[in-house]
Amino acid sequence: MFANISARYDLLNHLLSASMDRRWRQKVATRLRNITGDRSRILDVACGTGDLALTLFGATGARVVGADFCRPMLELARAKASRLNQPVPFIEGDALHLPFPDDSFEGVTIAFGLRNLSSFEGGLKELLRVAKPGGIVAILEFSKPTVPGFRALFAFYFHKVLPLLGGFVSGSKSAYEYLPDSVTRFPDQEQLALLMRTLGFENVDYSNLTGGVAAIHSGTKAK
Ligand SMILES: C[S@@+](CC[C@H](N)C(=O)[O-])C[C@H]1O[C@@H](n2cnc3c(N)ncnc32)[C@H](O)[C@@H]1O
């Protein structure tokens, strides 16, 4: 599915979110602002076309690596990094079996990726495994709008307008029907925070973005 939509993925992200996705990724980078300098390492899991990994590199100066299991996405990410002259490697890897040893990264991120994994719990455990003790894991994901009137309006857009528009531009209607369905199956803000605490994340916190359309959750690995 991701291979099929890869060519139009960036365009649709910006179009369907009215470019808010850029601001959301920037906020993830702000969450990781204490990680600086090229002695620190950050892993962006399910990196897609590389936007978050490249944002993190620009914001922190850390050594950033992106991982994804979809080759066409990785090829686009590599081309983007080379165009921008940014030394960010993009490697093939499954988010549920990351090709890195335990305790490797000061920061680990995943944006709009966790929801797609066959096990949210398995994905969270794997993010925590590769984080260093004291390291931070940040998750950007669609969530549940919190304001009732806005929630209804957004539900109409997300379930009715977005699949039509996304399907038309990408040529894959099913991918943009899958998107709202997968968000419906995903835990809301509080449920995800609870799951993270249950799995051993410390200092779990979240902030809503754009009225809860998306949220950034973060937690640290015990020292
Ligand atoms: C919605 S895109 C998000 C891409 C990017 N993080 C962003 O913010 O635009 C989801 C990405 O997750 C990747 N993905 C899904 N399941 C995965 C898995 N098990 N392992 C690695 N990548 C996965 C897909 O290939 C796709 O690139």
Image (tube, helix red, strand yellow):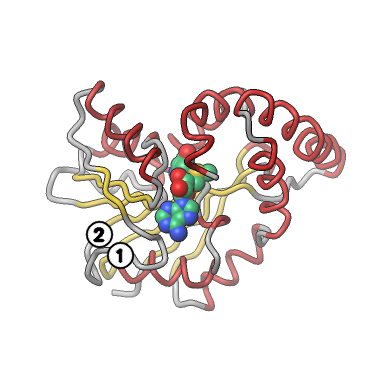
Q: Secondary structure at mark 1?
A: strand
Cβ atoms under marks 1 and 2 closer than 8 Å: yes
Residue placed most toward the observer, 45 or 200: 45
Q: The residue under label 2 is which amino acid type?
A: Phe
Q: Residue furthest left?
A: 39
Look at label 1 and name its amino acid: Ala
CB at mark 1 closer than 8 A to ligand 1? Answer: no
Disc count in the image? 2
Image location of residue 48, percent across then percent down: 42, 41
Can residue 221 be seen here? The reply is: yes
Residue hosting label 1: 131
- Point 68% across, 42% down: residue: 174
The residue located at (47%, 28%) in the rendering is 7
Which mark, by number, is residue 84?
A: none
Viewer-proximal residue among 66 and 199: 66
* Position of 86 relative to 101 (above/below): above
What is the x, y in percent for residue 17? 62, 29
